[in-house]
Image (cartoon, rainbow, N blue to C red):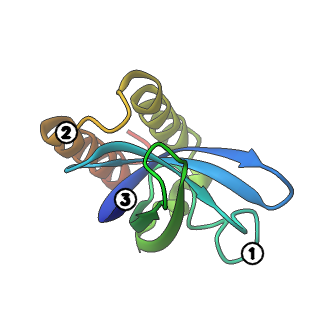
Amino acid sequence: MDISASAIICAVRNHGETGAIVRAFTADYGMLAGYVQGARGRQLRPVLIPGNVIKGEWRTRIAGQLARLTPEPLHSRAHLLGEPLAIAAIDWVTALTAATLAEGAPYPRVHSAIDGLLSAIELAPAA
């Protein structure tokens, strides 16, 4: 499986010493999980914040295997980390999305709605 798509980071779970398992929501492929090596390093830690938009490349050798994810930042919402209300809203939206949507099922309307909601939170962080 080789997938390259824009995605919203929904969940990041530490795995091993430096890696993390990242769940990201794409418009065409739905929720996808991938292992990011070096995710807790200086370069990737600011990229893998829930709510950020990345261009991800998921690669596997065998179907059913956890993909290796290579993330590239497209849009960062890290400047909202100082706003408690905004970050609470982003955490709630991304955690709810990661917990409720099925893996690999496309939901293009839900993706555009979540992207719009995150953009609205970004425009009015204290409202």
Compare marks 2 and 3 and give the one earlier in the sequence: 3
Q: Secondary structure at mark 3?
A: loop
Q: Which residue is mark 2?
A: 113
Q: Which quadrant, please, contains the N terminus? A: bottom left
Of the residues shown, which amino acid type is indicated by label 1? Arg
Compare marks 1 and 2 and give the one earlier in the sequence: 1
- For label 1, count other residues whose C-alpha is less than 10 Å away and answer few (under 14), some (14-19) or many (20+): few
* Rendered location of residue 45, percent (x, y): 67, 65
- Work out whether 101 lies above or below 127: above
Residue 97 horizontal side relative to residue 49, left or right: left
At 47% from the left edge and 24% from the top edge, which residue is drawn? 99
At 45% from the left edge and 32% from the top edge, which residue is drawn? 98
- For label 2, count other residues whose C-alpha is less than 10 Å away and answer few (under 14), some (14-19) or many (20+): few
Q: Which quadrant, please, contains the C terminus? A: top left
Viewer-nearest of labels 2 and 3?
3
Residue 51 horizontal side relative to residue 49, left or right: left
Closer to us: 107 or 81: 107
At 13% from the left edge and 38% from the top edge, which residue is drawn? 109
At 62% from the left edge and 48% from the top edge, which residue is drawn? 21
Closer to us: 82 or 22: 22
* Rendered location of residue 27, percent (x, y): 22, 49
Q: Secondary structure at mark 1?
A: loop
CA distance for labels 3 and 1: 29 Å
Closer to us: 118 or 26: 26
Q: Which residue is mark 1?
A: 42
CA distance for labels 2 and 3: 27 Å
Q: Which residue is mark 3?
A: 1
* Rendered location of residue 72, percent (x, y): 46, 75
